[in-house]
């Protein structure tokens, strides 16, 4: 039987504090993953020590923002007047630091869980109970 190598568009709802939630992609597809891998790279320059090495300029803010933008599909957040908002790049950038940290942590736990599910349980070293 032929396999389907495509990432299904599945989402997962993550619970946040105060009853809020975050809906995220279960897995990124290849294009999304590759875009995310390069998101924090700003520039590559020849090393200043005249060797064949290169110096990389990284922007961790861009990488963090790109991660949230790549995964988040929906959320329960509202604006100051109580109207529902969408997780646009502008709205994600406008979050307060405490909420952004909560989203980062929830997403990191989600990614770890998905990686664990994808790879299955790790074998125990010989002689240790499972």
Image (cartoon, rainbow, N blue to C red):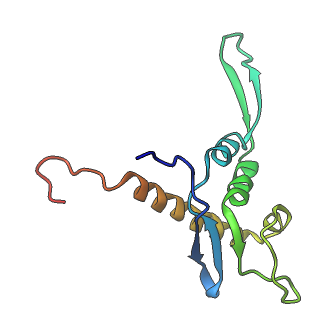
- Rendering coords of residue 8 (x, y %): 57, 58
Left or right, 59 with respect to 22, comes to right
- Rendering coords of residue 6 (x, y %): 57, 50
Residue 7 sits above or below residue 26 on the image: above
Front residue (pair 69, 93): 69
- Rendering coords of residue 126 (x, y %): 14, 47
Identify which residue is drawn at 63% across, 63% down.
Answer: 104
In the picture, the quarter occupied by the C terminus is bottom left
Residue 61 sits above or below residue 79 on the image: above
Identify which residue is drawn at 63% across, 67% down.
Answer: 24
Front residue (pair 39, 73): 73
Task: Tell me the quarter of the picture where residue 85 sits.
Answer: bottom right
Identify which residue is drawn at 86% across, 64% down.
Answer: 90
Task: Tell me the quarter of the picture where residue 41 sits.
Answer: top right
Left or right, 85 with respect to 73, comes to right
Front residue (pair 29, 22): 29
- Rendering coords of residue 18 (x, y %): 63, 87
Task: Tell me the quarter of the picture where residue 9 sits.
Answer: bottom right
Query: Which residue is situated farthest in the left direction here?
Result: 127
How many numbered discs sit on the rendered protein?
A: 0
Query: Which residue is situated farthest in the front direction here?
Result: 1
Residue 32 sits above or below residue 87 on the image: above
Identify which residue is drawn at 71% across, 10% down.
Answer: 50
């Amino acid at each position: 039987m032929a396999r389907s190598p495509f990432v299904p568009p599945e989402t997962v709802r993550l619970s946040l504090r105060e009853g809020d939630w975050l809906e995220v992609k279960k897995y990124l597809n290849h294009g999304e993953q590759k875009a995310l891998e390069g998101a924090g790279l700003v520039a590559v320059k020849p090393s200043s020590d005249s060797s064949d090495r290169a110096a990389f300029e990284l922007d961790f803010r861009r990488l963090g923002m790109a991660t949230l933008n790549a995964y988040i599909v929906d959320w329960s957040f509202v604006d100051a007047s109580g109207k529902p908002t969408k997780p646009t790049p502008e709205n994600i950038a406008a979050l307060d630091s405490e909420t952004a940290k909560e989203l980062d942590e929830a997403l990191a736990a989600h990614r770890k869980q998905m990686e664990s599910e994808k790879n299955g349980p790790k074998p125990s070293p010989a002689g240790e109970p499972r």
